[in-house]
Image (tube, grey):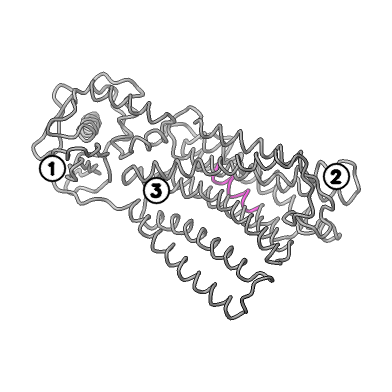
Amino acid sequence: MTASVRPVPALLGLPVVTGVTAGACVVALAGLGAAGHGGFATEPAGALALAVAAVAAAVAASRLARSGHRAAGRLATGLAASLLAYLGLAVLAVATVAAGHRWAGPAVAAWNSAWIPPLALLQLTASAAVRTGTVTPKAHRYVGLVLGAATLVNALLTTATEPFDGLPTIAGESWRTALAPVGAAVTLLGVAALLLLPVTLWRAALGSHHTVRARLGVAAAAATAAPLTVVFCLLLAIARAPGDVEPSLGSVAFLVALSGAAVFSAACAVTAARGATEPRRVGTVVRGTGLAAAALLVVGAGTLVAAPGSSLGPTSVALVVSALTVVVGGGAWAGTGRLAALLTTAPEVPAVAPVTPRGGAEGTAAGDAPPHAGTPDAAVSDVVETTGPGAAAAEVAPDASGAAVCVPASAGAVPASVGGLTAREREVLAALAEGASNAGIAAQLVVSERTVDAHLRAIFVKLGLTPGGDTNRRVRAARIWLEHARQRR
């Protein structure tokens, strides 16, 4: 389903404002770097990467606003603002340290914590892009609350001993942490929060069908970029010791990785919001995520194998890393290819006439195959093209036995009344007709799966669809919805 909300004009000029502000920050950091201040914080590569990511997030916010996805547009705006804040705090921190100002310590602490909010916002933007409810999900609140607390705790408990003086952020000896157990606990909660949305979205995607499955899969891949960025940060710590990699290089690499994750998630949010489900595009998104994870695994293992204390010689190290690359990379390529195909492949469609419900409630048709005993109800899936004059897209509704029925695809049009259903029940039935599983419906409408199950039971009762019999209730309910929608056109 597509949100029918008018665009937000205020967001349409956001990319220009963001670009000007980001450019000013980059110039300021370049000037401080030329004067010999700031270390890696003023490196052009990291500053430019953050600036580009901020502009990309602003462009995504503008496009989401034009498509009517207000919540996702606001969150993308927040993502752009958080990246700009990271740049601005870098300027402030470097300038105050260079001037010996008394606010240098708080400025550095704030800058050192400013990388956390973008991770939360890039996840929330992607998740909001596939939701149709107006209520803020509990998962969003949990992610925002926990990562907000992690940002505050990190800023209050960590103190730089020699900021920008040859000891960048990833070098552990450059920071002191007060109340270490508290910091460790909040860090663990933050990691758990970053895993919540990817797990929820992947579960909803794999339980849904075709169009809904592909959109949820794209959003899930985007949300996965945040924990992968954290893994990359941990690998940088490993690269520092025992890998003996130059800290400045690792810190700049982290800024680039964070920026890349933000751009990737913003682009995925726009793709998911527009309902783009082309196999090539979905395959690119899924393969990119899988290969990034594989690359991190190879780099981490390779760093440990090549550490100065390792007993392996250069030749052995090269052979081990090469073997890891082939095995892990090949497995990731094959696995993500199958996952992309699963997200986009439509089942074969036998020709079966559409059903017109009797009395606006229940419809039957010859050709409906009975579900297998003990098999859960199947959801509706896949959009295919019909032929002939006036042909329109058609929905393919497989029942639990695997048989498919073809009915007109008009789930986006909401019939005013289907068997006396409430507005929320119509939303649930429309999502079902698009191919969403219970988890997929819950993810889109921002309700619990228990609530979805209760709505479906009420829908089945109102439509006169009793359990058992010779047809599948989910399929028949979806066909009733789509037939009503077609008749109203």
Separation of disc 2 and disc 3 at Cα?
Answer: 47 Å
Residue 257 percent location from the top left of the image: 61, 56
CB within 8 Å, label 2 to label 3: no
Q: Nearer the viewer, residue 394 or 479?
A: 479
Image quadrant in which the C terminus is located: top left
Which numbered disc covers residue 276?
A: 3
Is 57 contained in the magenta span?
yes
Residue 461 percent location from the top left of the image: 23, 21
Q: Which residues are magenta?
A: 51-61
Which numbered disc covers residue 284?
A: none
Secondary structure mostly seen in magenta is: helix
Is 256 contained in the magenta span?
no
Q: Nearer the viewer, residue 66 or 46?
A: 46
Image quadrant in which the N terminus is located: top left
Q: Disc 1 residue type?
A: Val
Classify residue 333 by image quadrant.
bottom left
Residue lying at the far bottom of the rendered structure: 315
Classify residue 119 by image quadrant.
top right
Separation of disc 2 and disc 1 at Cα?
Answer: 72 Å
Separation of disc 3 and disc 1 at Cα?
Answer: 27 Å
Which numbered disc covers residue 352?
A: 1
Residue 102 percent location from the top left of the image: 90, 41
Residue lying at the far left of the rendered structure: 366
Instruction: Name the residue located 57 percent from the left edge and 52 percent from the top edge.
Output: 261
**Mark with earlier residue (2, 3):** 2
Classify residue 208 by image quadrant.
top left
Q: Please identify, in this view, whether the residue under mark 2 or under mark 1 is nearer the observer.
A: 2
Relative height, residue 377 to residue 50 (above, below): above
Q: Disc 3 residue type?
A: Ala
Q: Which residue is mark 2?
A: 104
Residue 111 percent location from the top left of the image: 75, 46
